[in-house]
Amino acid sequence: MAGPQTIAGVREGAKEKSLFAELHAQVEQCTKKEGSNGKPFWELRLRDAGDALTLRVWSDSPNVRVCESLGDGECVAVEGEFYVNGGFGLDARRWELRRLLPDERAALFEGSEAERARNTEDYEYIVSRVGEIGDPRLRGLAERFLETAGSRFRRAAAARVNHHARRGGLLAHTAQMMRSALAIAGAYPRLNRDLLVAGVLFHDCGKLWETCPPEEGFAIKSDLRGEMMGHINIGVEVVNALWRELPRAEWEALTPPSDEVRLHLIHLILSHHGTMEFGSPVLPKTPEAVALHYVDNLDARLEMFFQGYATGTETGPGVFDYVRPLGVSPVAPLGAFTGFDEGRTKPD
């Protein structure tokens, strides 16, 4: 058997046939319940950086002994035969449960080798693009943000559900948005590239408080500041607080005026949801605000399509389960052109 796998990796591997594997995850909740026959059972909800899994532990299972002393937040290994149980999703049989050793627990929060490499690549990409910002005010602000909040930024989620709703999701979302925004800035050179890059970095910075799991955790718990203010308002507060820490006296001779730069960046944060219906207190009123809104929406929606393919069930050939935020049942994309089928000749 290979090393420990993620829940998503096991889910993908068990789509066609059952899979013997060991997965490591954190206990989100372990609750004792009673079945319709009156017999007790334990409902064990597990989570890792990218997915969740619920297993039931029946009263005659040897795993009951572990569940009886298992607390929320502990980390466990589940080893057994995993399979997709019809419309009920991923399940397991003949499985064993144990607590993780300290080194296994540390590795779980660091993520798999592939996840660590991807997160490092995304973070270094963002740092590099920030370093290329020409306006010293926006560059200084962005660098100060990464310096003071980099650790929290790397573990925050981009949402509770819909898209990038996982530990490290905000980092992935921001890096991909930045790639798209820079591509668009190349096609539309009249856009203020510096402002757009800063806007991508800061547009969801309030989610460092609204949707950020703890240092050793995957669950996105409610935060008082996040609940009472929302990430847009927190984002404005973060920018203003960081702005006051920077050497503004050195900027007096710069053009455009510093306060205009700050106001344009705040406008991007306030308007990035696009409409008041979806939480923006103002509509996008500049080219950069419009570009940021569509880049944000594009990455969020594409991520929901990809998640729909990865976790959904085919309800028909090439048609997947309905995804509520998209309002559609995703259809498998057309494959890339690779040439002519074997045995067929090229037409004249």
Image (cartoon, rainbow, N blue to C red):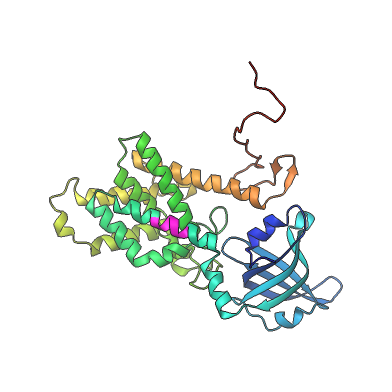
Task: Give the residue at x 84% y 76%.
Answer: 39
Q: Nearer the viewer, residue 217 or 297?
A: 217
Would residue 272 be visible to someone looking at this image? Answer: no
Q: Which residue is farthest top?
A: 348
Is 253 positioned to the left or the right of 31 in the image?
A: left
Q: Horizontally, is 280 left or right of 54 in the view?
A: left
Does residue 344 lie above or below 248 as drawn? above
Pick the quarter of the image with the C terminus: top right
Residue 251 place in picture, x, y as percent: 16, 54
Residue at position x 60%, y 32% in the image: 337
Q: Which of 275 and 176 is in front in this view?
A: 176
Residue furthest left as drawn: 253
Q: Where is residue 189 in the image (x, y as percent from the top left)?
A: 31, 35
Q: Position of residue 78 (x, y in %)?
A: 69, 71
In the depicted view, which residue is nearer to us: 187 or 269? 187
Corner quadrant of residue 7: bottom right
Q: Locate residue 347 relative to residue 111 in the image: left or right.
A: right
The range drawn in magenta is 119-124
Q: Is residue 278 left or right of residue 13?
A: left
Q: Where 334 falls versus 52 (above or below)?
A: above
The reply to whether the magenta stretch includes residue 268 is no
Tell me where residue 1 appears, x and y as whole percent.
70, 66
Numbered marks: total: 0
Q: Is residue 316 above or below residue 198?
A: above
Res 189 visible: yes
Residue found at the very far right of the displayed protein: 37
SS assignment for the magenta stretch, majority = helix
